[in-house]
Image: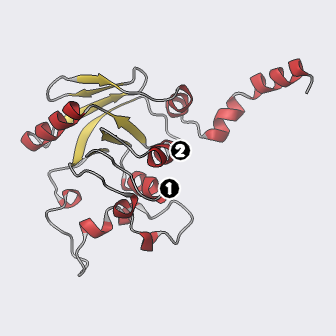
Amino acid sequence: MEKFITLTDTIVPLPIENVDTDQIIPARFLKATSREGFGEHLFRDWRFGENGCPVGSFVLNNPLYRGSILVAGKNFGSGSSREHAAWAIAGYGFKVVVSSFFADIFRNNAMNNFLLPVVVTEPFLAAVFAGVTENPAMTLTVDLENQRITNNHTGQSESFAISAYKKECFLKGFDDIDYLLNRKGQIEEYEKRRGL
């Protein structure tokens, strides 16, 4: 997988609270078992009307907003535990999702699919939404190594939490198997010491 160290990019704002996984990827698109193709159905029922035409008022259809950072309202990813929600967001091209709160299962699914969930305070989130309304070209910088996110419009910066294990996986581009293979020597040494 691609290493994630630092990302500076424009953002796509979704200032809606309590976005659940059925809104992220509707259930009728869950028939596939591979990750390919889910990005085109991200927020499908919000992006397109019943006639299949794009809904002009929805942010993903607004040419002003582009970037690999999705900024969402509080309680993002609630509802069912479908991993397809993370597949759809990553498949669309997002690398980071920022919110003031994530549902736990969504958060874990995101990290397992190299989509970095960054939790910020509500005032920080509000400042980002206000800034991008004023200047759609504003950027955020996500510095994983130092676990900091910076609003480049205001200069405001916050730390964010991530487990040491998942941080290493992102920094080195490891999935779970890669992580274990990278520890092979240590595992063998441990087994040798224990007489296994």
Q: Position of residue 106 (x, y in %)?
A: 45, 49
Name the residue at 43% across, 28% down: 5
Per the image, the residue denoted by label 2 is: 112
Disc 2 from disc 1: Cα separation: 9 Å
Above or below 115: residue 31: below
The amino acid on which the numbered mark 1 sits, given as a three-letter code, is Glu
Q: Position of residue 156 (x, y in %)?
A: 20, 23
- Which of the two labelled residues, at mark 2 and mark 1, occupies the earlier sequence position? 1
Relative horizontal placement of residue 129, taking residue 1 as reference (left or right): left
Per the image, the residue denoted by label 1 is: 83
Above or below 136: residue 170: above
The reply to whether callout 2 and callout 1 are in contact (CB within 8 Å) is: yes
Relative horizontal placement of residue 124, taking residue 146 as reference (left or right): left
Q: Secondary structure at mark 1?
A: loop
Q: Splitting the image into 4 quarters, where does residue 121 fall?
A: top left
Relative horizontal placement of residue 37, taking residue 127 as reference (left or right): right
Comparing 62 with 84, the one in front is 84
